[in-house]
Image (tube, grey):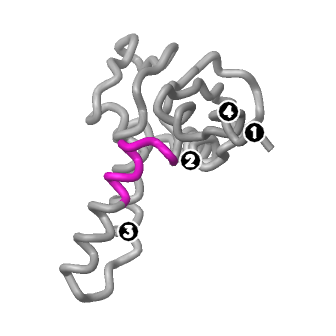
Amino acid sequence: MDLSKYNTRKGSEEGAWVEIYAPDETETKIKIKVLGRDSDTFQSKIKRVAEQNRQKKKGLTIAELERQSMEAYVACTEEWENVDDKKGPVECTPENIRDIYKEYPWIFEQVQEFVEDRSNFL
């Protein structure tokens, strides 16, 4: 079997576009380019979080675990299209990505699901 056609690391490093749908499943025209879970960016962020948790040697709150998890997805978000607010287009910066993912959890959930599905990066 030729495993090269299943190289998710390569696709994860290149990234892929996820189309975002509103909670009622209508098209939003929002597209977000993300790196996959097998990318060096995602893996290094997850390893850093695990090391911080190990060093703390105590239980973390659910809120802290969620915050740390979100940071991996923020780091893997490379660009976006058609993300606007009342003032107009929203620049794709780590701060704005974090704000959008917090304010609109349905966007964040779609990004998470897409990143976690390796078949999106083949």
Across and down, in percent, residue 44 comes to 32, 52
Q: Earlier in the sequence, mark 4 or mark 3?
A: 3
Residue 60 lies, with reference to residue 26, above or below; the image says: below
For the residues bearing labels 4 and 3, Cβ distance under 8 angstroms: no
x, y percentage for residue 76?
41, 38
Which residue is at the front of the view, 59 or 57?
Answer: 57
Q: List x then y, in percent, for residue 4.
A: 67, 36
Cα separation, mark 4 vs mark 2, equals: 17 Å
Return the x and y of residue 89 as percentages of the image width and height.
39, 12
At label 2, which amino acid type do we have?
Gln
Name the mark on residue 112: 2
| Residue at mark 3 to residue at mark 1: CA–CA distance | 38 Å
The residue depicted at 32 percent of the width and 31 percent of the height is 96
- Looking at the picture, which amino acid does disc 3 mark? Leu
Give the mark toward the camera: 1 or 2. Answer: 1
Q: Amino acid at mark 1?
A: Asp
The front one of 22 and 49 is 49
> Which residue lies under the disc numbered 4?
122
Disc 3 from disc 2: Cα separation: 15 Å
N-terminal-most mark, 4 or 2: 2
